[in-house]
Amino acid sequence: MRRLAFATALATLLTTPALAGKVFVSNERGNTVTVLDTDTWEVLTEFAAGNRPRGITASPDGKKLYVCASDDDVVRVFDTATYDELYTLPSGPDPELFVLHPSGNPLYIANEDDNLVTVTDTETHTILAEIPVGVEPEGMGISPDGKYVVNTSETTNMAHFIDTETFEIVQNTLVDQRPRFAQYSADGKHLFVSAEIGGTVSVINPDGGEIEHKISFAVPGIAPELLQPVGVRVTSDGKKIFVALGPSNRVALINGETFEVEKYLLVGQRVWQLAFDADETFLYTTNGNSNDVSIIDVAAEKVVKSVQVGQQPWGVVVVSD
Amino acid sequence: MMRWLVAILFAIGALARPALAVEVTAAIQRVDYPTLLPVSRLDLRPDDLGFAGGLLATEDNQTTGRFMGQTYALETAASPPETALATFEALQAKGLRFFAVQARMPELLAIADAAAPDTVIFNTLAPDTALRSDQCRGNILHVVPSRKMKTDAVAQFLIWKKWPKWALIHGSHPEDRALADSYRASAAKFGARITDALEFTDTGGARRTDSGHVQVQRQLPLFSQPLDGAEVIVTADEADVFATYLPYHTWSPALIVGSAGLRPLSWHPALEAWGATQFQNRFEKLTNRYMRAEDYNAWLALRVLGEAVTRTGGADPAAIRAYALSDKFELAAFKGQKLTFRPWNGQLRQPILLADGRITLSVSPQEGFLHQRSLLDTMGLDQPESACTAFTK
């Protein structure tokens, strides 16, 4: 028995990431946030987070957790250590997804029902600008230098590039049906936009907005209409791109140089959003229909565990201690 | 001075606009047929039925058009069937070339046959199979599902449930009999068996008056006694005469599907999957009511137009029609997959919702029904079954 415990401890030591931390998962139907320990992958707690929590992110110092409480029309801010609600930020109506400026201020929020992007100052708690965009804004990405924020509008089918100084739209790229997510590569040279109903990920050159490549998906035995790309994450070396494929219950792994799909990893049901931990050892996926999170070993390119969370997990962010 | 300023502003405005601004005006033409009150007052027809969906689509198109140098406008017109053609001709005289028409087959065909060349007509109401087959017209694109798509949707669900034995009750109106025939064809297509059939003759009646329910409770069991033992009763009642009364009033306990109970619909206000919640929210904010299938169909028609204008960069009716029918066209419409047109008869492929009035119970096509082209082609007229040649000539 002792030997078994020792072996387990050793195995844990070998597989745990160097940086300890917490995984925060927003549960859209449960109105809660579930917290996992990145060392043990045990659920630490689940706390109330307002009505219909969806988009979730953290301040650069890891101390504050931001949650879009869509049906409360606010962003709720929590302490990542105590889980206490600190205050709320004005977000405009129906905030769905947002992105924080790399400096931690401001927050750029997609207002799904009102065709707006709201810019909120995280220090003064005031709205700096409201930018009219296309119908049903959702995806929000920011360039690594913080100069451009990109919003995708799901019914207009565009990526809107917004200048973060003037709050003006400077260019638009028409993509395939229902763009859900926008993600820059760490070097700022590529912007990835997923189109859920179009079934593609457009690789866009942010300089000029041309589509340079379109990634498509195919899995034998899976109806093509189930391959619905949503969340996109890219390793900071640009070599691996992960794309969540919704109701096909798979995450695609794409070669960052050739843009060819190399693997499909089987995860939980209706996978939408993805988040790396701090050193990109593991990738966490939210599986909305099986109410769990799958954990992918990034180097081994394998799913290593799944953990039950709250009702209909939507977004995920990892904070290191 | 002021005049100069205005002139300068005007010039700047003109410069800032893209060189080739596209202006797109569409019409929604609705034919109002004389009808009795619906069986349930929850189904009372709002005055803006259909128009409201078109208004939302025009707003959606306009929001996109702002980034593309395109502007959209909408005209609406309602008329009784006798003046439907005159109403259409008046709209056509204004130069309109895009029409979403909410009419039954005779008026729809009269309009299509009177249309100028290069007119695009979207059928948002008529479910007739003939319109997708030997009576098809090259200038009509059908965004409304056909009767056959809907009866196939119900049949697939019942087969998936392994409930292949059905009884059938149909009304006495021609559209009820056509619907019953469609259910018979769907049963044959998917391997179900209709064990018994009854016709409910519309003799008029008290409908929902003070004592109406008493009569219903006494009479419907007797009427349905010949179907004693039937577990699934398919109802074909497009005229809305009896089916809504049937659940719980049958002789023996039975599930009701078709025109009551589990119903095949192109839209339902309780749908919330696939981003539908935000779409329902936008509609309800605009109109202060729930979205009906007629509104969704009108929205679909004008979004097909908007999407084709966005992608082709123009509003030439022939180019719009060609693009919509091409394999490049796809439309996201809150049904979980892209909608496309069947190039052999101009029918928009789409999933069919199965709803009980409270929630979406299921969506067809069902798992396990396969097709070499598109799973959506397991519902409705497939290419070899359609006698339409207007699209392939």
Image: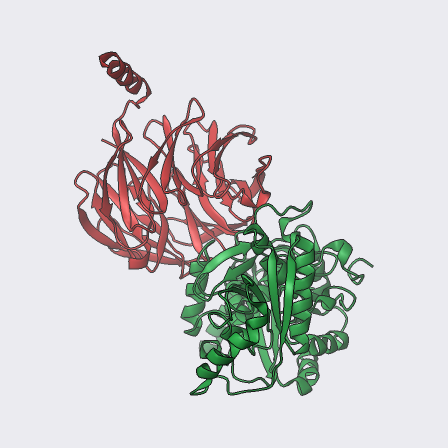
Chain colours: A red, B green
- A27 relative position to A115: left or right: left
- B247 relative position to A307: left or right: right
Residue B123 visible here: no
Depth order, front residue of A63/B286:
B286
* Residue A311 in the image, given as x and y percentages of width and height: 33, 47
Q: Is residue A81 above or below residue B60?
A: above
Q: Quadrant of residue B69?
A: bottom right
Quadrant that contains the C terminus of chain B: bottom right
Depth order, front residue of B72/A241:
A241
Residue B311 visible here: yes
Q: Is residue A1 above or below residue A51?
A: above
* Residue A305 in the image, given as x and y percentages of width and height: 37, 29
Q: Is residue B139 above or below residue B222?
A: above
Q: Quadrant of residue A116?
A: bottom left
- B386 relative position to A148: left or right: right
Depth order, front residue of B220/B93:
B220
Q: Residue at (54%, 87%) from the top-left corner?
A: B205
* Residue A286 in the image, given as x and y percentages of width and height: 38, 40
* Residue A215 in the image, given as x and y percentages of width and height: 56, 37
Q: Residue at (50%, 79%) from the top-left corner?
A: B39
Q: Residue at (75%, 57%) from the top-left corner?
A: B344
Q: Is residue A58 above or below residue B291?
A: above
